[in-house]
Amino acid sequence: MTDAALERLMPMHLVLSADGRIVKAARTLRRLRPDICLEGVNFFELFELRRPRGSSRVEELLKAEGGRLSLAFRQESHGHFKAVAVPLEDGNGALVNLSFGFAIVDAVQAYDLTAGDFAGTDLAIEMLYLVEAKSAALHESKKLNQRLQGAKIAAEEQAFTDTLTGLKNRRAMDHVMSRLTRERIPFGLLHLDLDYFKQVNDMHGHAAGDEVLQVVAEILVHETRDTDIVARVGGDEFVLVFKQLSEVNVLLEIANRIIRRLEEPIPYNDAYLAISGSIGITTSLRVGVATPEEMLEIADLALYASKRAGRGRATVAPIADASPEDVAPSRS
């Protein structure tokens, strides 16, 4: 058989001399080791024989059962091969035909091999096509899952968001308060109701009211932390949840600061819109064991104490079992 025919049928074969020197290396093997000239190299120094283990002579290769070999490059992590050795016609040496076996996928990636580096009848080509098809399918499946996950997150976020202000809505507030209560994480609660908001709507129209609500949302976000929850729970009602913050004096300071900012006139067209805010304050530590609904009721009572006291102020709800008169409203 001519050398050209051998190259075409067995692009990963080696011809060994009787003393184990490589006489000829086919084109694909030369691609695997472009760093050295394979001709003249000792086969047993280039490869580690794993079956038959420890072989160091050509005769031992030929005596292996069926001439089947398992070997690997000594200095390459990807060069693992199956092989078959047969004697040359003159009996002086051997022809060794190698293949990658199950390591073909890693080898193709490591050595940048193409279909032209394998025999036309090599089933490895079919295997590569299947692997590529599977990889493409998995990639598309992953992209689809990512899109679905993104759509799910967007839908969940939309379900928890007030569309006018971009704040959280009542559903989100209920979810957060239920989790904090269930996990016994202390938190503070501010219930805010805007003062004079109805007059703004009546005098300037609902567009002006929407502008006010959006400005209020910006103020509340600015005066709270990223870990806090700011929710619009009604037309002009807001609830602020402060995780791990239950110091009443700190919450009262925040409430008064919010009220001062709310009382700054809001420019709208050629007019200035004037509002204020009444706030009720409580904490999970002050009410003891209570449901989120009970906490909101307590904060709501404190809010209306602020309304009765003249609006534009904050009231701290009394400690559980204390008299409501024990705590007076605080004017900012």
Image (cartoon, rainbow, N blue to C red):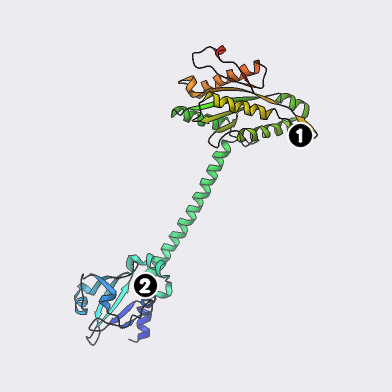
Picture layout, residue 215 above or below residue 20: above
Question: Considering the numbered disc 1 on the image, is that residue within a helix, a strand or a loop?
Answer: strand
Above or below residue 194? Residue 226 is: below
Q: Amino acid at mark 1?
A: Tyr
Residue density around tag 2, few if under 14, some if 14–19, many if 20 or more, within 10 Å: few
Point 77% across, 29% down: residue: 204
Viewer-closest of 46 and 246: 246
- The image position of residue 321, as x and y in percent, is 49, 13
Image quarter hosting the N terminus: bottom left
Determine the residue positioned at 49% across, 20% down.
Answer: 286
Q: Which residue is mark 2?
A: 122
Asked where in the image residue 324 lies, by quadrant, the reply is: top right
Marked residue nearer the N-terminal end (2 or 1):
2
Q: Residue at x 31, y 79 (%)?
A: 14
Q: Is residue 234 visible?
A: no
Residue at image mark 1: 268
* Image quarter of residue 191: top right
Kind of residue sitting beneath label 2: Asp
Q: Horizontal and vertical percent for residue 329?
A: 61, 18
Between 160 and 330, the one lying in front of the other is 330
